[in-house]
Image: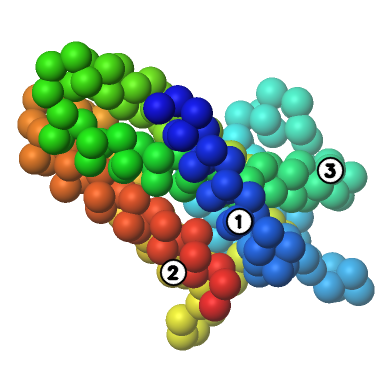
Amino acid sequence: MYKVIFKIVIVFSLLISSESYSQEKELFDLIITDENATPDLLPERIIFTQKIFWGENGILRKTGIAPLNLENREKELNLRRSMLKTHQILGYFTLGAMVAQGFIGGELYNATGDRYNSLYKTHKNMSKVVNAGYFTGAALSLFSPPPLVNKKTKGFSSIKAHRFLSNIHFSAMVITNMVSDSNKKSHKAAAYTAFASYATAVIVFKF
């Protein structure tokens, strides 16, 4: 069982990650700026998780760990690029783990006796892998340094869709963990919602 699950995760991750080079440009559009421009050191719009650490009065500014100047902002953009790239790679791995977890969960609902106990243990262990990958990836995105420019754009974009879907799958993941032992129906519904919205958020970068 473990060998099958491991193969599912690896193969799925490799298949999706083969598209990463074409998707990476759009993922990092918020980082790339005109070299001849002279923008402010911080964008007008910063999400609150970034503002806590990287804002003008953020923790890293107040403590002197990362003073707000051009040299540090250049370093921060490089750090942002690395964090978002890791976020992207973890996203592919986590999606593969979710597929494996769904396979295990489906088998679990129809299992009895010793097979149920074995699958339940595997399901619990895989949930730790999924949670570790998911919430680590989320933290890398939420707490990365802000870009130089973060302006509102009219109309639909993959970035907007990705952010909208992230609100759904983040909430669904929290609920999935909260009701994992207390309500099987809610757990199943939340897990499917998390997977569907998460998979769509990953795929949307292709369009």
Specify the amino acid type for callout 2. Ala
| Alpha carbons under labels 3 and 1: distance apart | 32 Å
In the picture provided, is 163 more to the left or to the right than 140? left
- For mark 1, give the secondary structure: helix
> Which image quadrant: the N terminus?
top left
Residue plotted at (25% across, 53% down)? 193
Q: Which mark is residue 15?
A: 1
Q: Where is residue 166 shown, x and y percent of the image?
A: 40, 54
Give the residue number, with chain letter if any, for mark 3.
75
Would you identify the image quadrant in which residue 71 lies?
top right
Seen from the viewer's position, the closer of residues 130 and 164 is 130
- For mark 2, give the secondary structure: helix
Seen from the viewer's position, the closer of residues 59 and 23 is 23
Circles 3 and 1: CB atoms closer than 8 Å: no
- Mark 3, Cα crowd under 10 Å, few <14 / some 14-19 / many 20+, is few
- Mark 1, Cα crowd under 10 Å, few <14 / some 14-19 / many 20+, is few
Q: Earlier in the sequence, mark 3 or mark 2?
A: 3
Specify the amino acid type for callout 1. Leu
Query: Count of labels shown?
Result: 3
Q: Which mark is residue 161?
A: 2
Depicted 7 relative to depicted 45: above or below: above
> Which image quadrant: the C terminus?
bottom right
Front tag of 1 and 2: 1
Specify the amino acid type for callout 3. Lys
One can see residue 137 in this view: no
Front tag of 3 and 2: 2
Residue plotted at (27% across, 17% down)? 118
Q: Earlier in the sequence, mark 3 or mark 1?
A: 1
- For mark 3, give the secondary structure: helix
Q: Where is residue 133 shown, x and y percent of the image?
A: 50, 34
